[in-house]
Image (cartoon, grey):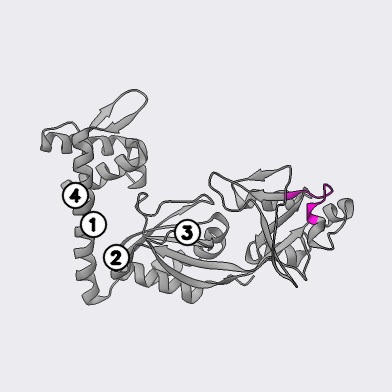
Amino acid sequence: MSYLESLRVFTRVVELGSITSGGRDLRLTPAVASKRIKELEKHLGVRLFNRTTRSLTPTEVGKVFYDYAVKALESIEDAEAAVASFSDTPRGVIRVTAPLGAGRRIIAPLVPRFVEKFPATEVHMRLSDRKVDILSDGLDVAFFIGTPQDSNLKLRKISDCPRVLCAAPEYLEKQGTPRTPDDLLSDEHNCLLLRYPRSPEYYWVLQTPAGPRKLQVSGKMDADHGDVLTDWALSGYGIVNKPRFDVAQHLESGRLVEILKDTPPPPTIFGCLYPHRRLQDPKIRHFVDFVISNADVAG
């Protein structure tokens, strides 16, 4: 098993670009991860990485070996999944990613219940509002809110996810309450935007009697963290466009007020993506089914 562990460490180091990051991803110390790489190089009799004080890059032979190592590890995972399917007993590590809001409020509360039900499993969660690459990041399941673009992955819709425009009472008292979608385009209003490299959300879409309308809204503040936008809205700094579940407690308490109820944002999809081959594994199938059966995104 130590050789397999060395292969896993090697592939993650290549993918993440450092021994520290590769080891951390596998819950190993940098010292242990470095030892695994050195053992692998000694076994193969070649140098797998070019090392400098600032970078770590695979050598030409390292790149070739990486391609074969990935295929070997995938074959082993497929073999283990095939054996596990005979008993249909979930076991092993499940690597999951989700947007920050959905991850914290929907997925995370379900994880302890799933692990209690299937004690032979481990769930490793990674939360980020940025776009992730499931395959290169070595993930099993990626939950999302919106419309994914990657057609190479299997998509499973969980439910529609209602969205809402809202702002703090203090903001609306100071700036006025928008009565029509056009009011959002006024210089009087500050729209709080979720922005990050390659972000699709540089505009808002509202449902109107004439059909969906795209608005090129703007504001003085944006962030790549959805909860930061909520905090700014709660502090009276602007209007936010959020999944309803994400701000439900604030709407109920009155700390945020829904606006433009007659022309709300259209609901988006809450779902998950995974490589086609992964659903052969009972642990992935059971985890996805468990989330689908227990997730509440209605708010």
Magenta segment: 184-191
Residue at screen point 74% across, 65% down: 251
Disc 4 designates what residue? 4
For marks 1 and 4 on the same chain, the one whose residue lies earlier in the sequence: 4
Q: Position of residue 119 (x, y in %)?
A: 34, 67
Question: Which tag is nearer the camera, tag 2 or tag 3?
Answer: 3
Question: Which tag is nearer the camera, tag 3 or tag 1?
Answer: 3
Disc 2 designates what residue? 277
Along the line of sight, which residue is nearer the eye, 142 or 205? 205
Q: Is residue 185 left or right of residue 102?
A: right
- Quadrant containing the C terminus is bottom right
Distance from Cα at disc 3 to Cα at disc 4: 33 Å
Task: Kindly state the secondary structure of the residue where label 1 is placed.
Answer: helix
Question: Which tag is nearer the camera, tag 3 or tag 4?
Answer: 3
Distance from Cα at disc 3 to Cα at disc 1: 24 Å
Along the line of sight, which residue is nearer the eye, 136 or 30? 136
For marks 2 and 1 on the same chain, the one whose residue lies earlier in the sequence: 1
Badge 2 vs badge 1, beta-carbon distance below 8 Å: yes
Residue at screen point 80% across, 58% down: 182
Q: Position of residue 31 (x, y in %)?
A: 29, 34
Disc 3 designates what residue? 149
Instruction: Using the rendered view, name the quadrant where residue 183 is placed.
Output: bottom right
Badge 3 vs badge 1, beta-carbon distance below 8 Å: no
